[in-house]
Amino acid sequence: MSQPLRVIFAGTPEFAATALAQILAAGHAVPLVLTQPDRPAGRGMKLQASAVKQLAVQHHLPVAQPLSLRLDGKYPDDAAAAHAAIAEAKADVMVVAAYGLILPQWTLDAPRLGCLNIHASLLPRWRGAAPIHRAIEAGDAQTGVVIMQMDACLDTGDMLLTDRLDIAADDTTATLHDRLADMGGALVVRALADAQAGKLQPVKQPEAGITYAHKIDKAEAAVDWQQSAEAIGRRVRAFNPFPAASAQLGADTIKLWRATVDNTAHHKPAGTVLSADAQGVRVACGEGVLCVTELQRAGGKRLNAADFLRGFSLTAGQCFEPHTAHKGH
């Protein structure tokens, strides 16, 4: 590397922290880190710093946590302080990864090389907040990471670098997240090297194939047994670790963490338990059978089917509630 770049980093969750770690390991200077304010978390609801802030503090990097960057918005003092910090950083470039705040035009214009975004999908597919979840839920065979030159709209900027990976049949959002986070960190380090060398070649996103990855709503967790086993199985994987697919059996809410799909035909009403043993809880779906192999009662631990059934009576013929009966749980 010739001269290290001065990089402002804006990000919040673990996905972003992985990229920040790789930028630091590559030898770039990070004069400022922007991240979301500390939030209450855990059973005690104590204030908790984001994964990015925790890493920044370990490396003694300056951190700003504005509630907004809009100078004309609800928190103008926060935005003004951030504006001053960004100006003082004299950055060459800003790298943004799952930050969670809208970047107004003045932010995009501040660094001489603009703002590079690490986006975990093959744009223009899955623009928006939850591209990893939605790719699994939709049954996509492939996903990847795009490094994008940010503009003022949502994930519409020119693409600079792209890398792809296959989505495995047993991938969850948790497992896919970790592979994409590593890929994103490596790819943005490459983009920074290309930026230094003046080799970045922007490519406009195609007009065809645009989809939006809307933010995950907890209400989506409720399983609709009228759907096919294939569709429910994808949702189980997509919603692991958040918000976790769930089903209602009488007064009990049961989270479904892992499941396999059996396309065997049956003639039972959707939601009927066909069998429950150490191999899994087999439930009739609108089409096919879902075999749930890891479950959790409210307040309990995640358990494999054998351990779960030792403490919870579940027998063939019982029926999970229809979707409408527990929507929003």
Image (spheres, rainbow, N blue to C red):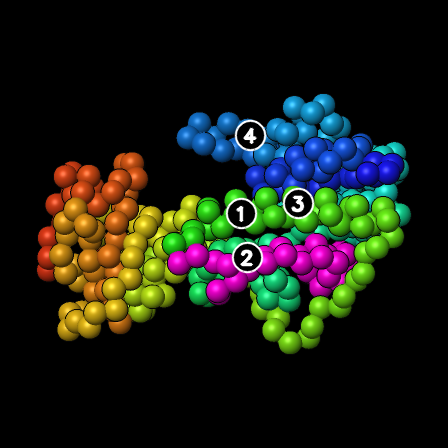
Three-letter amino acid code at disc 3?
Ala
Classify residue 229 as left or right of residue 97: left
Q: What amino acid type should be assigned to the residue bearing mark 1?
A: Arg
Magenta stretch: includes residue 210: no
Residue 8 image point, x, y percent: 78, 39
Q: Residue 282 placed where, x, y %?
A: 19, 58
Per the rendering, the mark at residue 165 is: 2
User: Is residue 222 something one can see in this rendering?
Assistant: yes
Residues tagged 2 and 1 counted as in contact (Cβ below 8 A): yes
Of callouts 4 and 2, which one flags the residue occurring earlier in the amino acid sequence? 4
- Tell me which segment is drawn in magenta: 140-169
Q: Relative to 300, is 213 on the left or the right?
A: right
Closer to the N terminus: mark 3 or mark 4?
A: 4
Image mark for residue 186: 3
- Mark 4 = which residue? 48
Examine the rendering and report whether any part of residue 131 can be seen. no
Kindly identify the amino acid type of the residue bearing the numbered disc 4: Gln
Looking at the rendered structure, the kind of residue marked 2 is Leu
State the separation of the CA atoms marked 4 and 2.
33 Å
Quickly name the residue at label 1: 179
Residue at 18 percent across and 43 percent down: it is 306
Q: What's the mark number on residue 304?
A: none
Q: Are marks 3 and 4 in contact (CB under 8 Å)?
A: no
Whole-percent x, y for residue 230 in the image: 34, 66
Q: Is residue 158 magenta?
A: yes
Label 3 crowding class (10 Å Cα cut-off): few <14, some 14-19, many 20+?
A: some
